[in-house]
Image (spheres, rainbow, N blue to C red):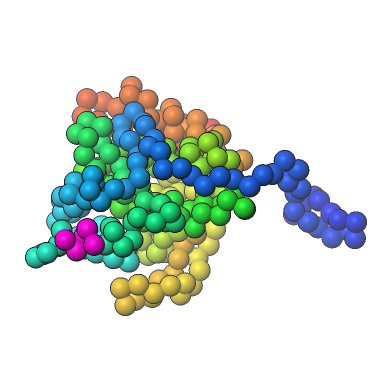
Amino acid sequence: MSQHKNHLGQAIGAPLTDWQECQRPPKTPIQGEYCRVETLDVKKHAEDLYHAFASDEDHSNWTYLPYGPFNGEGGFDKFKVWINATCTNDDPHFHTVIDLKTNKAVGIASLMRIDPNNGVIEVGHIHFSPLMQRTPISTEALYLLMNRVFDEFGYRRYEWKCDSLNSPSCNAAKRLGFIPEGVFRQAITYKNRSRDTAWFSIIDSEWPALKTMFEAWLKPENFNEAGEQINSLHSFKN
């Protein structure tokens, strides 16, 4: 219940006395401990990404994406056509995740529906190959994007949306600190089927505690020689 009222006694939202329109996120790379996140470039990244995604042998990672898989004869050429048609715009702004151990591209994610006026931005088109799944890279890549959105550019709201039946994505959002906001029924169609869309978000007031949690979890001493976590992410939650 809002504690703020106008001169008519009507409940209204909290005032934003210092609010200024945000900048659009730049195309500069973001360096982490385990990975680097940089703007997707078909010449630099397409071949690495194609081979990384090919390690998903049953193509299950493509099930909830509105495109792909790009397998079979001419698959690589089709993949490059898709990148050029879909991944070279300012919104969505596609990023590639680079594994610092191999210097290879192993996944993608985008910042999209960018709304600087209201300070709202969404992370989407997340496709992490088996080469980075269940590794520190997958969490760090998403943390680096969050840090850019909240700390560098002062956005107020960070969104995550997915097919409500995509339980791995829903669980990942919750693990990363996104709050479930509900389901939009029959929101879109893709691959000749209907999708109910689950909505999640993080807002700026929640970010400082989440940032502390991520930074504690990502410390090298939290991983053994095999790269396995010693303590879970939520064990660092305040």
Residue 57 in view, yes or no: yes
Give the x, y percent position of residue 149.
51, 42
Query: What are the residue bounds of the magenta stretch?
Result: 77-81
The outermost residue toward the right is 7
The outermost residue toward the bottom is 192
For the point 19% across and 63% down, the residue is: 78
Q: Main secondary structure of the magenta part?
A: helix
Question: Of residues 77 and 212, which is closer to you in this image?
Answer: 77
Give the x, y percent position of residue 182.
53, 62
Question: Of residues 63 and 225, which is closer to you in this image?
Answer: 63
Along the horizontal axis of the image, is 161 left or right of 50?
right
The outermost residue toward the top is 221
Give the x, y percent position of residue 109.
36, 50
Instruction: Note whether 86 is above or below 41 in the view shown.
Output: below
For the point 46% across and 75% down, the residue is: 186
Give the x, y percent position of residue 38.
35, 41
Instruction: Note whether 216 is above or below 63 in the view shown.
Output: above
Residue 63 in view, yes or no: no
For the point 35% across and 55% down, the residue is: 88
Q: Quadrant of residue 235?
A: top left
The outermost residue toward the left is 73
Along the horizontal axis of the image, is 134 left or right of 113?
left
Q: Quadrant of the N terminus?
A: bottom right
| Residue 62 is inside the magenta segment | no
Along the horizontal axis of the image, is 146 left or right of 232?
right
